[in-house]
Image (tube, rainbow, N blue to C red):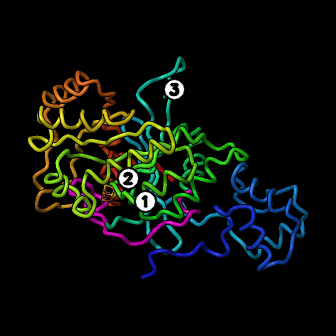
């Protein structure tokens, strides 16, 4: 199976200006460079969904583009809304696979009662090859990487379908973003292109399970986005059980790569830490985590564990339980007392299996379904 499909040659979404000109040249012929710029703007800044909307272009060029090219390839299959306002979107891909994206409103409200932040959680792969024991996506295994267009279109479709302004983006849905490195970087270049004014780089976080070589490379991309490391354990022994990738890339290597990310970009880093009852929630764990967090300007996102029983986990995955409320509070208090900047991630979307770690295309239709 081809797990790295090339950019569909007839899909112009997600292409840079020179790539748009080259694609058009190969099918239609030479067009002036400024036309390439106009098409790039229409596709990404103005979110055109058809070439007929591109009214700056001559009518004959629009109809040739319409004959030869498409704009994006994904389409909504289903969406579900949680009681807390979180919306999970199921998208069909052109080859029959499906992915999920989640729009999460913050609990903080403005004076009109609107959520201050609307964070979109994007997928980067169909499934995931990394076998993290707490994650529903792992049960799907890897089907393939998403194209740049498929990553970007999640943003554009969610924005269009909801009419909402997306304030933050996290690359934290299905898949390990740094294993689909080129398409993730390409999508970030477009989202953060100042000419397009889509979203500021400081409002984007890429979350990785920890691939030191790719983290180092990513540091030099000059994208200005935040990086989060899914840590979840402070000893290699436990982390290797929870996240088998740790056997290849132990904690020390990851932390050195995170050091480099900060050194090169100057952007504080984030550590993600899911609390599991009796496994990683002791006082000693909190102190080790604090020591790690203090290496660099950073924050720690402490995340409640969301059950993934619907994937029928086996082994250690079947034995994972959320930390008790008492341990959860004590752990966070200890971190704070150790000088760590702690954020507690909410369980938004848990009732529709849209919370952190629960994306797996598992249960459709969902309990609170709203029409397409
Ligand atoms: S947590 Fe992330 S990297 Fe790990 S299996 Fe799930 S999607 Fe893949």
Q: Residue at x 33, y 45 (%)?
A: 355
x, y percentage for residue 223?
Answer: 57, 48
Which of the 4 image quadrants contains residue 288?
top left
Q: CA distance from mark 2 to mark 1?
A: 10 Å
Name the spot of residue 109 as percent of width and height, x first.
Answer: 47, 23
The residue labelled by disc 3 is 114
Magenta stretch: give its range: 130-152
Q: Are marks 2 and 1 in contact (CB under 8 Å)?
A: yes
x and y, in percent, of residue 279 in the image: 11, 44
Of mark 3 and mark 2, the one earlier in the sequence is: 3
Query: Residue 57, percent across and down?
Result: 87, 60
User: Which label belongs to residue 214?
Assistant: 1
In the foreground, 241 or 29: 241
Residue at figure coordinates x 43%, y 45% from the top left: 227
Which marked residue is nearer to the observer: mark 1 or mark 3? Answer: 1
Residue ranking furthest to the top:
111
Label 3 crowd bin: few (<14), some (14–19), many (20+), radius 10 Å: few
Name the residue carrying label 2.
Answer: 208
For residue 229, above or below residue 310: above
How many residues crowd mark 1 within 10 Å: few (<14), some (14–19), many (20+)?
Answer: some
Mark 2 Cβ and ligand 1 under 8 Å apart? yes
Q: Nearer the viewer, residue 231 or 146?
A: 231
């Amino acid at each position: 199976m081809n797990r790295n499909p090339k950019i569909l040659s007839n899909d112009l979404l997600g292409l840079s200006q020179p790539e748009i000109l080259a694609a058009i040249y190969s099918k239609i012929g030479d067009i002036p460079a400024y036309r390439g710029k106009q098409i790039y703007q229409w596709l990404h800044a103005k979110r055109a969904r058809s070439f007929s909307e591109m009214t700056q272009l001559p009518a004959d060029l629009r109809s040739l583009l319409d004959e030869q090219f498409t704009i994006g390839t994904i389409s909504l299959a289903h969406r579900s809304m949680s009681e807390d306002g979180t919306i999970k979107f199921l998208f069909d891909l052109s080859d029959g696979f499906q992915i999920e994206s989640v729009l999460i409103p913050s609990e903080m409200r403005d004076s009109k009662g609107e959520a201050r932040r609307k964070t979109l959680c994007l997928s980067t792969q169909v499934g995931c090859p990394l076998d993290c024991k707490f994650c529903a996506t792992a049960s799907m295994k890897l089907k393939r990487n998403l194209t740049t267009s498929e990553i970007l279109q999640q943003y554009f479709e969610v924005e269009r379908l909801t009419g909402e302004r997306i304030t933050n983006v996290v690359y934290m849905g299905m898949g390990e973003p740094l294993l689909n490195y080129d398409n993730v970087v390409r999508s970030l270049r477009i989202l953060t292109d100042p000419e397009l004014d889509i979203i500021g780089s400081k409002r984007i976080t890429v979350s990785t399970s920890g691939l030191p070589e790719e983290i180092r490379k990513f540091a030099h991309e000059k994208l200005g986005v935040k990086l989060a490391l899914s840590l979840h354990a402070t000893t290699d022994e436990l982390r290797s059980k929870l996240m088998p990738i740790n056997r290849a890339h132990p904690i020390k290597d990851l932390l050195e790569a995170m050091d480099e990310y900060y050194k090169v970009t100057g952007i504080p880093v984030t550590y993600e830490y899911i609390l599991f009852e009796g496994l990683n929630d002791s006082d000693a764990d909190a102190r080790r985590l604090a020591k790690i967090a203090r290496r660099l300007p950073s924050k720690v996102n402490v995340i409640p564990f969301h059950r993934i029983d619907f994937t029928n986990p086996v082994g250690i995955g079947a034995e994972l339980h959320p930390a008790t409320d008492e341990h959860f509070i004590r752990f966070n208090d200890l971190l704070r007392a150790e000088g760590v900047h702690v954020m507690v991630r909410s369980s938004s979307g848990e009732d529709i299996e849209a919370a952190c770690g629960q994306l797996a295309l598992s249960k459709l239709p969902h309990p609170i379904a709203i029409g397409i």
